[in-house]
């Protein structure tokens, strides 16, 4: 029985899949770059064909009616993300096939600390309109020149003849585009075929994934299988697997690398990992939301409170990048007003039951360790300080914490950055909210503070989740973690321009939505963002955005804008 035709449940079927992928990886190594580009164009077309079913099944998996507002999240974090990624890799392959750098045409500027910043959004006029007021940059490590960026971009994509072997992709169970996107990156950046083991939560998407990835399955470089933990364990120990990539928890990563119980302790002490092949990972963390104090209007307080609450409640709180700890100034005269708006936003957001396995236990744990917590429409809000469990335990649930530090302006921001770096677990993503005039008043002190934030994605007046969906952005923990101290993970994924050795992504958005943005001097026409939990038109926006990504044009852009402005 072929594993591409039926669910893989036996070791024989898994062995067969790995053997087929070895042959496929050898075939891929000899495939001309132009043909690789054509295959990703075919993947793009295949995703278009299954997009509606993909979003519908993903919504039902999460107990969301496909017509409900929250269903829009499944369009954007499912087929839309896959379409953008496939198109980005096809463009990079096409550039390499024509003898050009995948970074050609990207604006390269300066970033703090002797870094260069590669502008990955907007890339063209349509993106300028679609993401009006937003920009995204990939910061390279200090000392890397713009010339190096262009000449070294490409990674393994243009290396015909390079055999990357067979990798195991252990897919996440919360966002439906993660597993395909991870397999894409293994193939494009490293010429590595992948056996993709789905998380059981997405078992119902097996057929959709196989049809979406059919061009890569047919050429022998992807196999998609399902099964329980025993299937994953068998594959991590399989002699035919050359590398592992996991999106999940640090506990799962460590169990794979070191084992569990006494075995893990002995292996750690002897520096003798159980896993003998390389592993990369994206493992989440406790994400800060730093609120720089200023003189805000009532509308500002309400909008930004809803912004932060949406960072927490998107996907019912089941996100590795969900904001978890709000960092406020104890000296901000409007602190209590902002907290009142946070409470109101938590209470008024549309009801949604947590769906991810184990959530009830995590909520109970948060409740037990915070007896004074507030309960608002089934959500928890609690004040914490450094050392609190909320600073180290990624709740993956509708639990929001807040803390307060002394100071205002640059003094507060420095303290907040220190708290985020030293008191919160993980380095995946950090969010900063600041009025434009307050940012200007801090001058280079603001830029220095952003430089000091040790996070793989930093969002200023935006959510780091935006960086996840931008194909040209990088996604992963801040560099420096190891298998012995894995933190939020090792290496990056996505990275559609195939930049070599990136450090982080910085996303910047408008402080206010249109029309208040323009009235206060921000040249942004962006309405209330569609990822806001209270958005009324998020499902229509998600559909139209996916339709646009299927064949970008000015004609298809207009319905996206019309839907977004009804939010």
Image: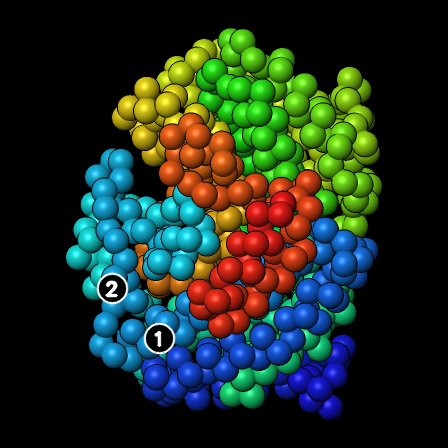
What's the residue at 67%, 56% (across, down)?
539
Q: Nearer the viewer, mark 2 or mark 1?
A: 2
What's the residue at 35%, 63% (across, down)?
498
Q: Which residue is mark 1?
A: 93
Q: Is the residue 210 above or below the residue 406 in the image?
A: below
Q: Secondary structure at mark 1?
A: helix
In this orientation, which residue lies closer to the viewer: 304 or 420? Answer: 304
Q: Which residue is mark 2?
A: 104
Left or right of residue 566: residue 488? left
Label 1: few (<14), some or many (≥20) within 10 Å?
many
Left or right of residue 288: residue 318? right
Residue 295, position in %: x, y? 47, 15
In this orientation, which residue lies closer to the viewer: 218 or 243? Answer: 218
Residue 17, position in %: x, y? 62, 83
Residue 501, position in %: x, y? 32, 55
Q: Quadrant of the C terminus?
A: top right
What's the residue at 80%, 57% (across, down)?
65
How many marks overall?
A: 2
| 3D distance between C-alphas at marks 2 and 1 | 12 Å
Q: Is the residue 169 above or below the residue 402 in the image?
A: below
Say which label, 2 or 1, has the lower sequence index: 1
Q: Secondary structure at mark 2?
A: loop
Q: Is the residue 514 above or below the residue 4 in the image?
A: above
Q: Is the residue 377 above or below the residue 281 in the image?
A: above
């Amino acid at each position: 029985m072929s594993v591409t035709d039926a669910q893989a449940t036996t070791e024989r079927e898994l062995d067969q899949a790995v053997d087929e992928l070895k042959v496929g990886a050898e075939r891929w190594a000899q495939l001309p770059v132009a043909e690789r580009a054509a295959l990703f164009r075919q993947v793009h077309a295949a995703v278009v064909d299954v997009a509606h079913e993909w979003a519908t099944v993903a919504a039902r998996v999460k107990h969301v009616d496909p017509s409900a507002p929250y269903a829009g999240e499944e369009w954007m974090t499912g087929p839309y993300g896959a379409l953008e990624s496939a198109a980005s890799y096809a463009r990079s392959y096409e550039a390499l096939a024509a003898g050009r750098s995948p970074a050609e045409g990207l604006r390269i500027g300066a970033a703090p600390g002797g870094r260069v910043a590669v502008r990955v959004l907007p890339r063209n006029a349509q993106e300028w309109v679609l993401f009006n007021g937003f920009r995204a940059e990939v910061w390279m490590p200090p000392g890397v020149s713009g010339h190096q960026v262009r000449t070294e971009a490409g990674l393994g994509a243009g290396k015909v003849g390079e055999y990357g072997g067979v990798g195991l992709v252990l897919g996440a169970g919360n966002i439906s585009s993660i597993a395909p996107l991870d397999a894409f990156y293994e193939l494009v950046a490293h010429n590595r075929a992948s056996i993709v083991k789905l998380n059981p939560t997405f078992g119902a998407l097996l057929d959709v994934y196989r049809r979406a990835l059919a061009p890569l399955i047919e050429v022998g470089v992807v196999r998609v299988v399902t099964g329980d933990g025993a299937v994953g364990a068998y594959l991590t120990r399989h002699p035919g697997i050359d590398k592992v990539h996991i999106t999940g928890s640090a506990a799962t990563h460590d169990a794979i690398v070191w084992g569990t119980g006494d075995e893990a302790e002995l292996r750690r002490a002897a520096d003798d990992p159980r896993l003998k092949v390389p592993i990369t990972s994206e493992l989440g963390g406790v994400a800060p939301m730093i609120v720089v104090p200023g003189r805000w209007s009532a509308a500002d307080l309400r909008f930004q409170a809803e912004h932060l609450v949406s960072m927490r409640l998107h996907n019912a709180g089941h996100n590795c990048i969900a904001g978890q700890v709000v960092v406020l100034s104890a000296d901000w005269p409007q602190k209590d007003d902002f907290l009142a708006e946070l409470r109101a936003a938590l209470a008024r957001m549309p009801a949604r039951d947590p769906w991810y396995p184990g959530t009830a236990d995590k909520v109970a744990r948060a409740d037990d360790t915070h007896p004074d917590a507030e309960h608002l429409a089934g959500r928890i809000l609690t004040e914490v300080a450094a050392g609190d469990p909320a600073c180290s335990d990624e709740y993956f649930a509708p639990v929001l914490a807040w803390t307060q530090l002394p100071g205002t302006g640059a003094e507060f921001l420095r303290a907040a950055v220190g708290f985020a770096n030293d008191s919160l677990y993980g380095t995946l993503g950090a969010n900063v909210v600041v009025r434009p005039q307050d940012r200007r008043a801090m001058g280079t002190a603001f830029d220095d503070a952003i430089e000091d934030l040790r996070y793989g994605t930093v969002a200023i007046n935006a959510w780091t989740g935006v960086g996840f969906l931008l194909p040209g952005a990088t996604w992963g923990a801040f560099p420096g973690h190891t298998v012995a101290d894995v933190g939020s993970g090792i290496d990056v994924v996505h990275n559609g321009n195939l930049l070599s050795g990136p450090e982080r992504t910085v996303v910047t958005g408008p402080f206010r939505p249109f029309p208040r943005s323009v009235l206060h001097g921000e040249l942004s026409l962006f309405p209330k963002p569609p990822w806001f939990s209270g958005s009324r038109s998020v499902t229509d926006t998600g559909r139209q955005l996916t339709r646009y990504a299927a064949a970008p044009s000015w004609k298809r852009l207009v319905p996206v804008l019309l839907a977004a402005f009804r939010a």
